[in-house]
Structures are given as structure tokens and as C-alpha cells.
Image (tube, helix red, strand yellow):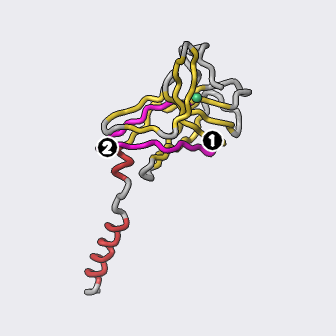
Amino acid sequence: MHNNRPVLALLFLFTQLVSYPVFADDNQDISINNVWISEAPPSVTTLAAYATIYNGSSETITLASVSSPLFSSIEIHRSNIVDGIARMEKQSSLTINPKESIELAPGSYHLMLFNPDKPLRSGNSVSISFNFSDGTSLSVEAPVLKRQNDNPQHHHH
Ligand SMILES: [Cu+2]
């Protein structure tokens, strides 16, 4: 029994090493809020999703990709009005400066979700993963909601 002490000390050290949070600080520094998917008729296979991403860290972060098991692919888009016509441009990534947030909202940045496995209605929710270039990945539950103040001039694809 008198040998226990060094073993416990070693175990303690080992535990400390293993549980050292390599990415945990980064994870806490990025927060994703107000995530929602805009409800669309069942025949529509391209949906739009919105969120607010806050970078609370002291480093610039880059949203490299977005994924969900329920969709064949997800793209980052930006809406622009060009000569009075609403257009969408695919973005290869989104950069968020330290202590700043970026709002994905109707008429601006948004996510395009392609080919859902099943029709989605308001009340459903979908897990969406936001993958950052430093390897951090955050998964959030995105509820499907009816769009308020719908702009009939803004059409998706
Ligand atoms: Cu779009």
C-alpha cells in the first residue's frame, strides 16, 4: 500500500495531459446563434438558412465549410442587388474578425442547403456543422421556421 502515492501522482499527471483542452478555448470563443432554416414548399429542394456567428477570440477565424447529414451539400452565398435584380454569389469561405460577428440574414449572407433527404416543415430541426479552417467544428440544431416579412422579390434559384 505504501507504493500507491507515486502511482496516483502519475495517474493524475496523465489525466492532466490527456484532458488538456487543445481546442476547447477556441470552441468557447466562437458562438453561433439565431440559427434557422426558412420553410419552403415540399417541391423546393434548395433551402436557405441563417445564423449569427460571433468570433470572441483574438484571432481572425474563417468559416471554411458547412455540412449536415440531411443535405447533399451546403454552400455559403451572398445576396446582392445588381441593377435592381437580386443575385447570389457563392462564397468559398467567410472571414470573421476578432470580437466581431457576422450575420447571415435574408438579403445578405446565407447558407444554401441542397437536396434534403426528406421534406422539412416548420417544427422540424436539423443538425448543421460549421467547420472552421483551424479545425474547430461546431454543430448546432437549426429549427425550420416560417419566414416572416417574406420578400416576394427575393427568389432562390
Ligand atoms: Cu443562395
Which residue is pictured at 55% across the width and 30% down the height?
A: 89
Residue 13 relative to residue 148: left or right: left
Number of numbered discs on residues: 2
Q: Is residue 153 left or right of residue 62?
A: right
The percent coordinates of residue 123 (x first, y second) are: 60, 29
Q: In the displayed structure, would residue 82 be above or below residue 96?
A: above
Q: Residue furthest front?
A: 83
Q: Which residue is mark 2?
A: 57
| Three-letter code, disc 2 | Ser
Q: Which residues are magenta?
A: 49-70
Asked whether, in this view, residue 41 is left or right of residue 87, the answer is right
Depth check: 8 or 139 in front? Answer: 139
Q: Hey, which quadrant is residue 54 in on the image?
A: top left
Query: Can you identify the residue that label 1 sits on?
Result: 73
In the picture, residue 9 is in which quadrant?
A: bottom left
Give the class, few, some or many, for how many residues have Cα within 10 Å of label 1's Cα (few <14, many ≥20): some
User: Is 102 a magenta residue?
Assistant: no
Image quadrant for the N terminus?
bottom left
Q: Residue at x 49, y 24 (%)?
A: 108
At mark 1, the secondary structure is strand
Image quarter for ligand 1: top right
Across and down, in percent, residue 40 comes to: 65, 25
The foreground one among 15 and 116 is 116
Q: Amino acid at mark 1?
A: Ser
Q: Residue shown at 44%/49% (left/top)?
A: 133
Image quarter in which the C terminus is found: top right
Nearer the observer, 38 or 124: 38
The quadrant in which residue 39 appears is top right
> Gap between marks 2 and 1, in whole Å?
28 Å
